[in-house]
Image (cartoon, rainbow, N blue to C red):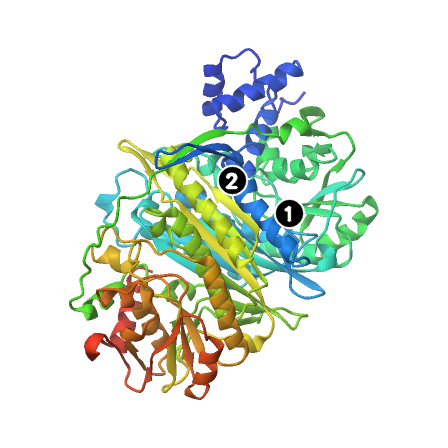
Amino acid sequence: MSAKTYRTVPVRNLSSDELLELSKKQKLSLSREDMEVVQQIFREIDRDPTDVELEVIAQTWSEHCKHRIFSASISHSVNGGAPETVNSLFKTYIKKPSEKIMERKPGFVLSAFDDNAGFIALDDNLAVCLKAETHNHPSAIEPYAGANTGLGGVIRDILGAGKGAKPIASLDVFCFGAPDTNPADITAPDVIHPLGIMRGVVRGVRDYGNRMGIPTVNGAIQFDPTYIYNPLVFCGTAGVIPRGDILKEMRPGLKVIVIGGRTGRDGLKGATFSSAALDEASHEEDFTAVQIGNPIEEKKTLDFILEARERGLIVFITDCGAGGFSSAAGEMLSVTGGEIFLDNAPLKEPGLISWEIFLSESQERMVMAVEEKDLPELRKLADTFQTELTVLGHSDDTGILKVWHKGELVCCLDNSKLHDAPIKKLESVFTPGKALTGQPLPDKDLNKSLETVMGDFAIVSREPIIREYDHEVQGNTILKPLAGAQADAPQDGSVVDIDGSDKCMAMACAILPEWGKTDPYAMGTGTVDECVRQLILVGSNPDKIGLLDNFCMGNPEDPAELGRLVECVKAIAKAADAYNAPFISGKDSFYNYFETEDGPINVPVTFLCSGFGVVENPDHVIGSSLRRSNSLLYLIGHTEDEMGGSVFARTHGVEDGKVPQTDCAANMELYKAYYGALTSGLVLSAHDVSEGGLAVTAAEMAFSGKGGVRLDLTKVPTVNGWKSPAVPLFSESTGRILVEVDPEFAADFETAMDGFPCACIGGVTEEKRLTATCCGGEKVLDCDIANLKKLWKDGLTPYY
């Protein structure tokens, strides 16, 4: 008789301390309270759990899978005031506001919050979706493999959305320590240097996306010392699907099949590993949690799924990611119940025990529910695309998840208990920063200031990394990440043509973690504003924008850290409502902190806002590079003395600056007016004024090679004014766009923008210099464009 492949774990008679010790020993990432609920479940059914059942519960209840911080009951107080109770950040500030927006614009959002990705209507026949995931902990342990499978996982999310969407474009956002970090400044052993992290992550994402034939068209990179210990790796993918293939529903009597890769020991306990802090032992102890990717296998799986969907052979589909079969099959059968037979699972190696097979996160696997009568045709398709198809089990009407291995029932769990994780109770506090002192800004030698800002890692060109990615495969990328005469000038967003439609899809993203260190509410509104602004700037219809929310933070059980998150989430609810742009998907990643002998190192509360929108006509698509040498430059939006969180403030030692505040409703009206001018053909080019301020924006537009820029700072629209010319040059006030207009259409543009903050502040010159004058015509800035471009262009080159 063969040896058992599972064991029974006694829990019914353990003390509270013993339960917690069991969780720690088995790396379940379950709290004392969670373990006590587990104990009660098995006391009620009068038996102890198997190790499979314990691992299934741990995976299902993990922060990574169940998002329990966003579902928690939080007692939140601000500045020592009376606490308010927030019952679920997700329901209160994301789902509920978004559903109200959806009611105001019926027929736009076709699916949200109940599938692997949310869908918006592109036209009468097609819908598009976007999903962004994080793969932080694996990338810290093994940068190449962690990031490689991060992108692979989100591509499978798109394949598992609806009955199988086609992945058409990707975006990637990375947060690293600076590549020039002195190794002596890294205060913990076995932490990979940021340069190694950066190179590994970039190449991991590169190899997966390029080999899959999916263009990477948009992204961002942030640098901060805290990201040395916990890099953040956001991977996103967009997809397209016929509208009739969005809805799917499980029912009893279906066959559950797996298609794609085999199951191995890679990726064990990935979900629970990602739901806990890293420490000095993580690199040695948790390496098995990192998956091994094979993009060629996933490409074959992709082709199989799209063909099967076209033939109407898929009833239900989901990706096999965190938690492996436990998550995919468990969620698929959560409504109906069913049986899974682990003996049927194709393995990479012999000898895997029951929980390893059921929980493994080996990549490139998709789980589907199909009619039994369609199995012969599906097997033929699998042979055609040279991928492996196996029947794992079936659905029934019991409401019970049963898992069999070698003739024994190794898991038998009631879905009603399995999917109801205990609600956490947390406390959060937020104390606003000290009163602003009005510290004088340095305003001598602003030429040098611009050179310093231009060469900062926050600003410099990402071209060495962008060039690693194929952003034109599939042949539909209209607005590319780089443009200009030398194809090396930056763009604010990207636009992708959609086969079978006369409309296009725009993509953009924004991330401002520096702002959140002092004003997380302003970070929330400002980040949403920047994402929406970029989408409209490149041609999106303001009324057809969908947003994604992705949050990363350190220890959510630290009230001060959690308080920053709560303030940020409140802000994005207000912003989404003002822009009439619903959140249709999202993801969060907590416990991004590193335990050292000197205490924990938390990443800043980091909010990534990604967005996608419908471009009604390709003619509406413009870039951010100057087109003429004699055009006029208009600045729309107000510029205020809001230097807090700016690159100028950080590089010049300016403290106590006010972080930019955002009037979302006013900005939306401004953007609609701009969109009217854009669609009327009055705009040659336009660039978002964001990190670095107006001076950086003007320089980047001039990197196209068409000419130089002259600015008159006295014409810059403002409400409260400023004392130093550094403010109009380097303030990062939100809601602003620098617009290039042909002199012939200047009057029409001014008419279109009448009643809004908009002024002609200069123009494009034959001489390739960036100049700015202030009061009395004093020249406060005079820089050679070629020199600025060299500083900007070569910033990352020595490190990559």
Residue 293, position as x, y percentages in the image: 52, 49
Q: In the image as oriented, which residue stretches furthest toward the right?
A: 373
Q: Nearer the viewer, residue 753 or 276?
A: 753
- Residue type beneath disc 2: Leu
| Distance between the alpha carbons at the discs numbered 2 and 1 | 19 Å
Residue 119, position as x, y percentages in the image: 63, 55
Which residue position holds label 2? Answer: 89
Q: Nearer the viewer, residue 302 or 483?
A: 483
At numbered mark 2, what does the secondary structure look like: helix, strand or loop? helix
Q: In the image as oriented, which residue stretches furthest toward the bottom?
A: 744
Residue 627, position as x, y percentages in the image: 42, 82
Residue 93, position as x, y percentages in the image: 52, 44
Q: Quadrant of residue 721?
A: bottom left
Q: Quadrant of residue 460?
A: bottom left
- Asked if marks 2 and 1 touch (Cβ < 8 Å), the reply is no
Figure check: 18 above or below 541:
above
Q: In the image as oriented, which residue stretches furthest toward the left?
A: 444
Residue at x 72% of width, y 43% of height: 257
Quarter in which the N terminus is drawn: top right
Residue at x 38% of width, y 54% of height: 512
- Residue type beneath disc 1: Asp
Quarter in which the C terminus is drawn: bottom left
| Res. 294 visible in picture | no
Query: Mark 2, mark 1: which one is toward the viewer?
Result: 2
Residue at x 76% of width, y 37% of height: 394
**How many other residues sit within 10 Å of disc 2, few (<14), some (14-19) or many (≥20)?**
many
Q: Nearer the viewer, residue 350 or 469?
A: 469
| Res. 251 visible in picture | yes
Which residue position holds label 1? Answer: 115
Tally of marks: 2
Q: In the image as oriented, which residue stretches furthest toward the top?
A: 13
Residue at x 65% of width, y 46% of height: 318
